[in-house]
Amino acid sequence: MSAGTGESGEGGTSTAVRNTIAAGTGCGCLLSPLALLGTLVVIIIIGGFGVLLAPLIALILLFSGGGDGSAGADDADEVIAVFNGDGGGELDTSTVPEDLVEPIEQAGDLCGAVGPVVIASQIERESGFNRELVGENGEEGISQLPPAVFEKYGEDDDGNDETSAFDAEDSIMAQGRHLCDLAGQAQRMIDANEATGSVLDLALAGYHVGMDAVRAAKGVPQTNEAQGYVLAVRAQFAKYAGVAAPPPGATPGVTPGVTPGTDPDPTASSSASAASGA
């Protein structure tokens, strides 16, 4: 759960999500993504952006591509537990491109606060595993680090005598070093009572909006950009941990229908409502 969001109502939300999934599986198939999206809009209106929204985002992203009708209440519980966890555990290697398994696992072994599931989930959010991507603010490569940040953390990890953000292994290892550095800063802030929340959430927010913003907010900033980023990364934990398999035929490392670089936005309820009624 993201820092800065309240914990009240989490049990009720989990029950609501379980009931939603169970209702959709009673006929032998998952509830349609549009129906889930409509439910999401209602939850946004009633509960606002935060812990009430998070599990539904996870389920929409994980199940929107279809399924074999086997998901039920127990599956929802497990997805939510992984969503709210620390991103630890082993990477399901079938969910990422084969040649990136080793660098993702290595980057996820650099520090205790960041595991390979976190690395893979963040890569999907940043670039959708596009190694050549250039961001609108100049971020480069599969991990979308700004040039100055990559210059600080990047090394020739693939041994080709060149350090480049467009070399996937160099980029992923730089991502891991940067994220571990941010996690260390977050831990020191928490220990000094300068911030509240989990180390991982603070580090993820720092990666996206900067640690100065996290420090000023004394936790994950209460903005759509910061909160949405943390939720979007967490929403992929279950897939990369092997808890919720991607739809048959899905490209490893990519969730169908999810655009890299976009955050869940509670202000988009009007367009979502239109989609749910289509």
Image (spheres, rainbow, N blue to C red):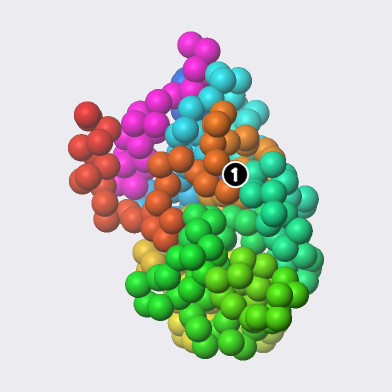
Answer few, some or many: residues within 10 Å of disc 1's Cα (few below 14, many 20 plus, some between 14 and 19): some
Q: Note whether residue 154 is visible.
A: yes
Camera-side residue of 265 and 171: 171
Give the percent coordinates (x, y) of residue 261: 42, 60
The residue positioned 49% from the left and 65% from the top of the image is: 132
Residue 110 lies, in percent from the top left, at: 77, 71
Q: Please give the name of the residue rendered at 27% of the width and 55% of the height, measured from the top-left corner.
A: 267
Residue name at image x 71 percent, y 75 percent: 160
Residue 77, quarter of the rendered image: top right
Check disc 1 and report its element: helix, strand or loop.
loop
Instruction: Find the magenta span and give its range.
Output: 25-46
Compared to residue 224, the image places residue 55 above or below, namely: above
Quarter-of-image position of residue 242: top right
148 relative position to 134: left or right: right
Determine if the magenta segment contains residue 37: yes
In the image, residue 40 sits, relative to residue 192, either above or below, namely above
Q: Nearer the viewer, residue 9 or 40?
A: 40
